[in-house]
């Protein structure tokens, strides 16, 4: 059976456009509703990490990129006063890999991929049924297009080196928000047109599937400013 790897930037639980309320639990429940094998999440507020296994029913493997205010419960309460305005500076943010419990999953650690005076970004890796799945979120430098281009390429390359070293010849899937449209890697499956990707090396992979907007609409609200993307591997 193919392994379905899905990726979604949760935008800290915000809708598009942002509102006061958080829809984080609703997003987590939605992204696992059809029981994908692996889900890579980005922009997860740190306060939510203890809740993800209960909300999803999956094994949750987090990697914190930026700590928010301590304790995280207080940071979460403050943020929920207006979720559309108060985000990572208060609650921090993490990457998370959710793995369906029918699969064996082994956490392989994480590395910092960002450099210089910008927000800390990480790539984490998890081995799932013989495939190393790497989850990353590259830096966002909106005010400088050239710096954005340079950062995205350099951080993706660091993530690739990290994942391939851990894989030691096994298949690799690199998933996440790359913050540069159409960014791919030589020797990997073809990227989609957007900034969210699942790139595969060493195993047959289907095309990148991007969710249509209506699939993430709930009660008239569009959940997140990113669409989930997914690839079937094997």
Image: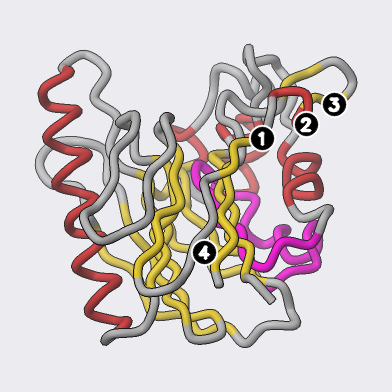
Q: Could you tell me residue 1's position as x and y percent?
A: 69, 76
Q: Nearer the viewer, residue 75 or 19?
A: 19
| Quadrant in the rendering for residue 21 | top right
Give the CA distance from mark 3 to mark 4.
26 Å
State whether residue 71 appears in this view: no
State the residue position of label 1: 211
| Quadrant in the rendering for residue 158 | bottom left
Q: How many marks?
A: 4
Circles 3 and 1, Cβ within 8 Å, touching? The answer is no
Q: Residue at x 17, y 18 (%)?
A: 145
Give the CA distance from mark 3 to mark 1.
14 Å
Q: Residues within 10 Å of mark 2 (few under 14, many from 20)?
A: few
Question: Height in image: 124 above or below 176?
Answer: below
Q: Could you tell me residue 130's position as x and y percent?
A: 48, 86
Please say whether residue 141 is one of the residues in the magenta stretch.
no
State the residue position of label 3: 218
Give the CA distance from mark 2 to mark 4.
26 Å
Type of colouring = secondary structure
Q: Find numbered disc 3 in the image and state the secondary structure of the residue it sits on.
A: strand
Q: Residue at x 44, y 62 (%)?
A: 63
Q: Find numbered disc 1 in the image and state the secondary structure of the residue it sits on.
A: loop
Range of residues picked out in magenta = 35-59
Residue furthest right in the image: 219
Which disc is residue 62 wearing?
Answer: 4
Question: Height in image: 107 above or below 29?
Answer: below
Which disc is residue 63 wearing?
Answer: none
Q: Along the polypeptide, which appears first: circle 4 or circle 1?
A: 4
């Amino acid at each position: 059976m193919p392994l379905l790897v899905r990726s979604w930037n949760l935008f800290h639980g915000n809708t598009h456009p942002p509102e006061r309320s958080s829809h984080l639990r609703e997003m987590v429940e939605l992204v696992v509703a059809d029981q994908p094998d692996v889900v890579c999440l980005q922009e997860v507020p740190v306060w939510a990490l203890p809740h993800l296994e209960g909300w999803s029913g999956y094994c949750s493997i987090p990697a914190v990129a930026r700590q928010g205010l301590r304790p995280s419960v207080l940071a979460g309460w403050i943020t929920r006063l207006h979720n559309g305005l108060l985000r990572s500076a208060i609650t921090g943010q993490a990457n998370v890999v959710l793995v369906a419990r029918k699969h064996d999953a082994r956490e392989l650690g994480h590395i910092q991929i960002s450099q210089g005076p910008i927000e800390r970004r990480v790539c984490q890796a998890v081995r799932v049924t013989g495939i190393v799945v790497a989850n990353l979120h590259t830096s966002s430098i909106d005010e400088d297009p050239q710096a954005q281009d340079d950062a995205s390429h350099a951080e993706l390359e660091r993530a690739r080196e990290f994942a391939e070293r851990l894989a030691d010849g096994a298949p690799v899937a690199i998933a996440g928000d790359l913050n540069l449209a159409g960014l791919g890697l030589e020797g990997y499956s073809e990227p989609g047109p957007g900034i969210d990707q699942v790139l595969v090396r060493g195993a047959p992979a289907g095309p990148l599937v991007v969710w249509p907007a209506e699939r993430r609409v709930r009660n008239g609200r569009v959940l997140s400013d990113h669409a989930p993307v997914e690839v079937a591997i094997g």
